[in-house]
């Protein structure tokens, strides 16, 4: 154990600098109040492999740049009530240079930059939440700090107990939770992306899931609507191109004769009250009992129930109300999602499970996507959905999105149309509304035009290719998926508080988030460098504006009504933006779209490059990785020129947009 404890103490408080050890990889440190505190801290749920947090690495010469200080306050009765510990409070402070900006803190409402905010990580059913809520459905005791020089450091308070993150003091992070817990720092590294790369390798962020039209089914709907043959019903949905995502809440109806209740009672599965009786709470079915997912035997019991349930034609499972909504438990939702994920894999080890979970904790992203809960149909929540998704991504949960149009209330046509344009760019994209509100599907927009729908289809098809990529092969590029555009130029302090634009890799998405037509013609503040605007010849004022970073190539698929219409042999379009040297590069990852053959090399990772020489731009494959066979297809190239202008080329045939520029394919080019 390195470092100097420097502990001072009186009858009620111990304080000093935290001691540290290097873990995980170079630049990552674990801090504890003392050697004794390290020995009695609870194991990690956040880390994909908990042993990594416990095992120091050797031969590390780097020392921490920033060392936290701590105070250990001996417990008082009021503290025990608030933080559920008789061992007292541990208060940790870590100070950074002035003008440091803070991000992350998980699922939070309010602004993107978190300075001045206080967050309590304690999963809460926050119906109709607003910008001032301090607790929502998920808990991420994590802060990403971007330093004035553009370098960044991530700080994790690795505790499953109630934890307060206090960012009221400028450039200072303060954690308060039950003693003892370690603090893990990642960096400082050269950029926020480097911090998130390291963090993601520790907690294993992933984005391998279905990309499909989703139809939600609840068991309540099946009984009320008379679908007593759910398998036939789902088969009919499959024929129309839909996937069936079934809702499973943790509340099991407290009723003898119901097989799940009888099975759970026989095995003593239920969460118990202090006097040892099953806890009973009222949810949708009425009085319910709740599996205790903190026990491994309960997680196995649930996974086997899921395994049998999948035979009904289940394509995915949606874990809702799993904070749970009638009580608060920080890791309950995560452990339920883990059990659900395991059950789906038991049912079919050759398919990638799709699990959606409202509640979560650091590490939930290994098992489930998420959404931002019970939002409201108004312009404030449209605007707030962008920083919420970004901060989830900046906290290691990349697969997220809001209920498009708002869950509560009825969106106006203009609001919903604008929200559809923005929501189509998020990793998780769906419309969802509460009972009694209008259904939020795009075909229900009264004022939608063919141009608007064409634009939505184009955006969705572009995202389809991005979301099918495999995390392991694009980790350095894809980090957090949606990321604040300040990451493109972290030294630009003005970019750090922009909330109406974000990055999808090298693509900057600029969104109109207010009911103000003047914003449609406003040019956004762009990061330093070349950023070329473009659209798909379907420009519409309610759709986001797109800018591609110079030096980049992105792949785009053609429009389809639903995913199953797509084919690997479909035409592929490369959108090219040259940098100041006349060069560009981009990746395309492809595999079967399901299963795990990619782990045995069954994928194709292609690197495309473009080079300009005089008036000619040459496009070619510079390298390819993987054993997956390249599909036979036509390749299109769109060379961006700025202000929406472009030149379009097709392999073996070129269309000219400007006389003195040509697009050639290298003689050795072998897309087919």
Image (cartoon, helix red, strand yellow):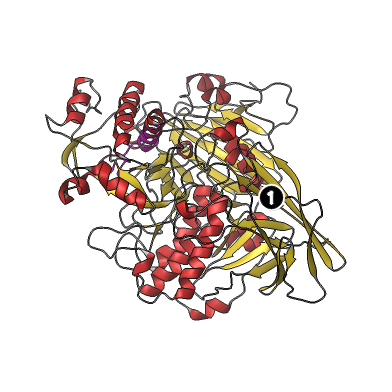
The answer to which of 206 and 3 lies nearer the viewer is 206
Q: Residue furthest bottom?
A: 518
Q: In the visual, does 449 lie left or right of 530? A: left
Q: Which residue is mark 1?
A: 672
Residue 164 belongs to magenta span: no
Q: Residue 272 is drawn in which quadrant?
A: top left
Q: Position of residue 140 (x, y in %)?
A: 47, 42
Query: Is 621 situated above or below 176?
Result: below
Residue at 57% over, 26% down: 7
- Whether residue 168 is visible, yes or no, is no
Q: Position of residue 57 (x, y in %)?
A: 66, 23
Q: Quadrant of the N terminus?
A: top right
SS of the residue under disc 1: loop
Residue 335 belongs to magenta span: yes
Query: Is 98 situated above or below 509?
Result: above
Q: Residue furthest left?
A: 256
């Amino acid at each position: 154990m390195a470092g100097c404890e420097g502990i001072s103490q009186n009858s009620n408080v111990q304080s000093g600098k935290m001691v540290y050890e290097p873990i995980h990889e170079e630049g990552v440190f674990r801090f504890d109040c003392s050697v004794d505190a390290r020995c009695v801290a609870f194991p990690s749920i956040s880390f994909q492999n908990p042993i990594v947090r416990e095992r120091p690495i050797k031969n590390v010469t780097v020392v921490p740049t920033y060392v936290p200080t701590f105070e250990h306050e001996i417990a008082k009765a009021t503290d025990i009530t608030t933080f559920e510990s008789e061992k007292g409070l541990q208060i940790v402070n870590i100070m950074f240079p002035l003008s440091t900006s803070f991000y992350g803190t998980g699922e939070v409402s309010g602004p993107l930059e978190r300075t001045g905010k206080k967050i309590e990580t304690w999963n809460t059913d926050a119906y109709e939440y607003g910008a001032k809520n301090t607790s929502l459905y998920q808990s991420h005791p994590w802060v990403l700090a971007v330093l004035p020089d553009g370098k960044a450091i991530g700080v994790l308070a690795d505790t499953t107990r109630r934890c307060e993150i206090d960012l009221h003091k400028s450039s200072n992070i303060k954690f308060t939770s039950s003693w003892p817990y370690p603090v893990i720092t990642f960096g400082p590294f050269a950029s926020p992306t480097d911090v998130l790369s390291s963090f993601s390798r520790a907690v294993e962020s992933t984005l391998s899931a279905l990309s499909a039209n989703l139809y939600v089914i609840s068991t309540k709907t099946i009984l009320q609507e008379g679908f007593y043959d759910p398998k036939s019903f789902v088969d009919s949905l499959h024929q129309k191109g839909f996937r069936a995502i079934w809702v499973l809440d943790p509340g099991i109806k407290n009723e003898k004769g119901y097989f799940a209740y009888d099975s759970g009672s026989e095995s003593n599965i239920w969460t118990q009250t202090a006097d040892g009786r099953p806890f009973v709470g009222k949810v949708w079915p009425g009085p319910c009992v709740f599996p205790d997912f903190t026990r491994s035997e309960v997680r196995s019991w649930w996974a086997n129930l899921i395994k049998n349930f999948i035979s009904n034609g289940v394509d995915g499972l949606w874990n809702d109300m799993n904070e749970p909504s009638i009580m608060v438990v920080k890791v309950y939702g995560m452990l339920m999602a883990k059990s659900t994920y395991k059950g789906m894999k038991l049912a079919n080890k050759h398919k990638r499970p799709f699990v959606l979970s409202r509640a979560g904790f650091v590490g939930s992203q290994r098992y489930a996507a998420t959404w931002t809960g019970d939002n409201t149909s108004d312009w404030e929540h449209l605007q707030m959905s962008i920083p919420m998704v970004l901060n989830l991504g900046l906290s290691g949960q990349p697969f997220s999105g809001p209920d498009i149009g708002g869950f509560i209330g009825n969106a106006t046509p203009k609001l919903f149309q604008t929200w559809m344009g923005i929501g189509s760019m998020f990793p998780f994209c769906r419309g969802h509304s509460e009972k009694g509100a209008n259904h939020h599907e795009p075909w229900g927009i009264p004022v939608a035009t063919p141009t608007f729908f064409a634009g939505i289809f184009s955006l969705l098809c572009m995202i389809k290719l991005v979301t099918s990529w495999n995390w392991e092969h694009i980790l350095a590029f894809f980090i957090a998926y949606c990321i604040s555009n300040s990451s493109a130029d972290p030294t630009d302090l003005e970019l750090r508080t922009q909330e109406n634009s974000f990055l999808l890799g090298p693509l900057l998405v600029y969104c109109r988030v207010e009911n103000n037509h003047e914003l449609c013609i406003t040019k956004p503040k762009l990061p330093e460098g070349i950023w070329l605007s473009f659209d798909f010849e379907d420009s519409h004022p309610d759709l986001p504006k797109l800018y591609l970073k110079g030096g980049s190539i992105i792949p785009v698929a053609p429009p389809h009504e639903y995913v199953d219409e797509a084919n690997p042999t479909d035409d592929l379009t490369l959108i090219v933006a040259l940098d100041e040297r006349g060069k560009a590069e981009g990746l395309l990852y492809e595999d079967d779209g399901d299963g795990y053959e990619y782990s045995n090399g069954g994928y194709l990772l292609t690197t495309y490059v473009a080079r300009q020489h005089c008036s000619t731009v040459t496009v070619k494959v510079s390298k390819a990785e993987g054993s997956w066979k390249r599909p036979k297809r036509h390749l299109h190239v769109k060379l961006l020129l700025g202000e929406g202008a472009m030149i379009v080329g097709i392999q073996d045939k070129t269309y000219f947009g400007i006389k003195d520029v040509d697009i050639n394919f290298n003689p050795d080019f072998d897309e087919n």
